[in-house]
């Protein structure tokens, strides 16, 4: 069971359904408000994460175990699809117009810092279950991997409490009071030529390229270090932790800068830099390790 989780085969399903989550919860946010949609995505994401830690192992329930993991990963993907877009919308609608880039840049830091914390928790848990390092790792592979999933429920509870205290987006409140909220958000987005053009521009011209850059730097890098460079688990996590600590402040820096010089050229520069450097960085790292 733990091997199934480590290979992350169920994770592919989470990525596949994420766009559907964005559409579904985006529509819901336009109909009932950002706050309540934001709360719903958190409950689904947090509940699914907690439940993964409670799934019986393969020896107990057979193939039902990986099937349950897949179902929960699908729910996580749906929730995350709505969570990120909902967070960006909520923050942007609260932010002053001249500081919108700065405010929303903090959203991206939470994703990266979340990865940082998760890597740290995994390393800490792997080495704290027994005084003997080898036995501790063996216990982690057997049952200790459940601990981060189960403990996450406390953070979920705290987040739910905070979100219950949050106020609705002022822009949505204003639209609702004036009766101008969308009746059919998806139809209005994809059914009108002008709106569809903006949707496609945002998808293919902005977010898709940035998604490739981000996931290559954050997740493919981890796979590359472990599977291609053959660096062991602990060392690869340590490398990523330091890389994340170094890179995270730049989200806020460039977000703030975008308020002064505009978003377009910062996004284009970042993607162009990735095109020019990614191949050489990964190839260079591999050659150094082979020397």
Image (spheres, helix red, strand yellow):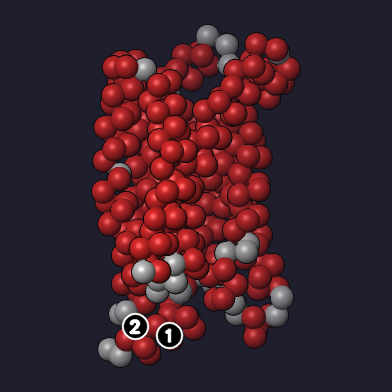
What residue is rendered at 44% in x and 26% in y?
268
Q: Nearer the viewer, residue 228 or 253?
A: 228
Label count reads 2
Confirm or deny contact between disc 1 and disc 2 (CB under 8 A): yes
What residue is rendered at 40% in x and 74% in y?
232
**Distance CA(mark 1)–CA(mark 2):** 7 Å
- Residue 162: where, in percent of width, then height? 35, 43
Task: Give the position of the N terminus as an image quadrant.
Answer: bottom right
- Residue 150: where, in percent of width, then height? 45, 68
Relative vertical location of residue 67 with respect to residue 260 in this rendering, above or below: below
Residue 256 in sight in this render: yes
Relative vertical location of residue 35 with respect to residue 201 in this rendering, above or below: below
The numbered disc on residue 89 is none
Is 187 on the left or on the right of 21, as rendered?
right
Q: Could you say whether the residue bearing mark 2 is in a helix, strand or loop? A: loop
Relative vertical location of residue 291 with respect to residue 157 in this rendering, above or below: below
Q: Nearer the viewer, residue 209 or 38?
A: 209
Q: Earlier in the sequence, mark 1 or mark 2?
A: 2
What residue is rendered at 30% in x and 90% in y?
132
- Residue 62: where, in percent of width, then height? 70, 80
What residue is rendered at 61% in x and 52% in y?
14
Task: Give the position of the C terminus as an image quadrant.
Answer: bottom left
Residue 253, located in which quarter of the rendered image? top left
Q: Could you say whether the residue bearing mark 1 is in a helix, strand or loop? A: helix
- Furthest-top residue in view? 178
Is 228 on the left or on the right of 14, as rendered?
left
- Which residue lies under the disc numbered 2? 129
- Which residue lies under the disc numbered 1? 139
- Residue 30: where, in percent of width, then height? 58, 25
How dense is the environment of label 1, judged by Cα within 10 Å: few (below 14), some, or many (20 and up)?
some
Q: Nearer the viewer, residue 32 or 249?
A: 249
């Amino acid at each position: 069971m733990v091997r199934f989780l480590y290979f992350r085969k169920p994770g592919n399903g989470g990525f596949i359904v994420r766009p559907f989550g964005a559409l579904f919860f985006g529509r819901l946010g336009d109909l009932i408000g950002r706050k309540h949609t934001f709360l719903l995505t958190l409950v689904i994401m947090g509940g699914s994460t907690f439940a993964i830690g409670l799934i019986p192992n393969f020896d107990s329930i057979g193939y039902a175990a990986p099937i349950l993991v897949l179902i929960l990963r699908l729910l996580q993907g749906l929730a995350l699809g709505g969570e990120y877009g909902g967070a960006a919308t909520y923050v942007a609608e609260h932010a002053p117009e001249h500081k919108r880039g700065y405010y929303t840049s903090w959203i991206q830091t939470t994703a990266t810092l979340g990865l940082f914390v998760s890597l740290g928790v995994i390393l800490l848990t792997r080495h704290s279950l027994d005084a003997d390092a080898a036995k501790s790792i063996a216990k982690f592979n057997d049952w200790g991997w459940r601990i981060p999933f189960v403990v996450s429920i406390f953070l979920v509870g705290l987040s739910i409490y905070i979100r219950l205290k949050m106020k609705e987006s002022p822009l949505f409140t204003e639209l609702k009071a004036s009766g101008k909220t969308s009746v059919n958000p998806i139809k209005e987005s994809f059914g009108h030529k002008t709106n569809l053009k903006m949707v496609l521009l945002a998808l293919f011209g902005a977010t898709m390229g940035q998604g490739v850059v981000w996931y290559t730097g954050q997740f493919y890098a981890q796979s590359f270090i472990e599977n291609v460079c053959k660096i062991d688990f602990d060392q690869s996590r340590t490398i990523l932790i330091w890389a994340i600590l170094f890179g995270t402040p730049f989200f806020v820096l460039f977000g703030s800068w975008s308020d002064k010089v505009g978003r377009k050229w910062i996004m284009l520069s970042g993607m162009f830099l990735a095109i020019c450097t990614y191949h050489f960085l990964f190839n260079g790292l591999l050659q150094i390790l082979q020397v």
